[in-house]
Amino acid sequence: RAHRIQERAAKVGFDWKRRDDVWKKVQEEMEELRETLHARSGKRREEEFGDFLFALVNYARFIGVNPEQALRGTTEKFIRRFQYIERAMRSRGEDIHHSTLERMDEFWNEAKRIKRRRKRVHAGKI
């Protein structure tokens, strides 16, 4: 929805001219969000987080990335890697609930290596 609204605004000229200016806005909103981390108001933090996301969506639109598709793809990638962690640990008799972040991260990186290797094989580079 944010993407569509920003596209509508851009069509009538309510838009940034330069990509660098859009990125500066993202950074500005990120700083405002960071400032709320010590605030007591969860509502203000939520508002600033929304502003930050909105600015990021605008940057995505500006560089030709569909933010919904990008986030969906990243979420699916996370799911696959996390499921790999679960399977790999189970197959080795390790309990994920009693594991360390470092150990799980080893399997995470292993999942990434396997995916890269499969991509290279599929592309005919191996």
Image (spheres, rainbow, N blue to C red):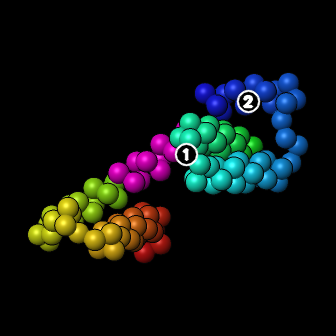
**Is 114 located above or below residue 5 in the figure?**
below
Earlier in the chain: of badge 1 and badge 2, it is 2
Q: Quadrant of residue 53?
A: top right
State whether residue 29 appears in this view: yes
- What secondary structure predominates along the stretch shown in magenta? helix
* Residue 123: percent from left, percent from top: 47, 64
**SS at circle 1:** loop
Q: Quadrant of residue 47?
A: top right
Side of 120 where 20 appears, left or right: right
Foreground pick, 77 / 29 = 29
Foreground pick, 113 / 32 = 32
* Quadrant location, the N terminus: top right
Spatial separation of the CA atoms under disc 1 and disc 2: 35 Å
| Residue found 56% across the figure and 41% down from its top | 41
| Residue found 59% across the figure and 48% down from its top | 39
* Residue 30: percent from left, percent from top: 67, 52
Q: Amino acid at mark 2?
A: Glu
**SS at circle 2:** helix
Instruction: State the mark number for residue 64.
Output: none
**Is 57 located above or below residue 106 in the figure?**
above
* Residue 52: percent from left, percent from top: 65, 44
Neighbour tally class for label 1: few under 14, some 14-19, many 20 plus, Cα within 10 Å: few
Q: Which residue is mark 2?
A: 7
| Residue found 41% across the figure and 53% down from its top | 77
Number of marks in the rendered image: 2
**Magenta highlight range:** 68-79
* Residue 116: percent from left, percent from top: 43, 68
Q: Which residue is mark 1?
A: 40
Q: Is residue 56 magenta?
A: no
**Is 123 located above or below residue 72 in the figure?**
below
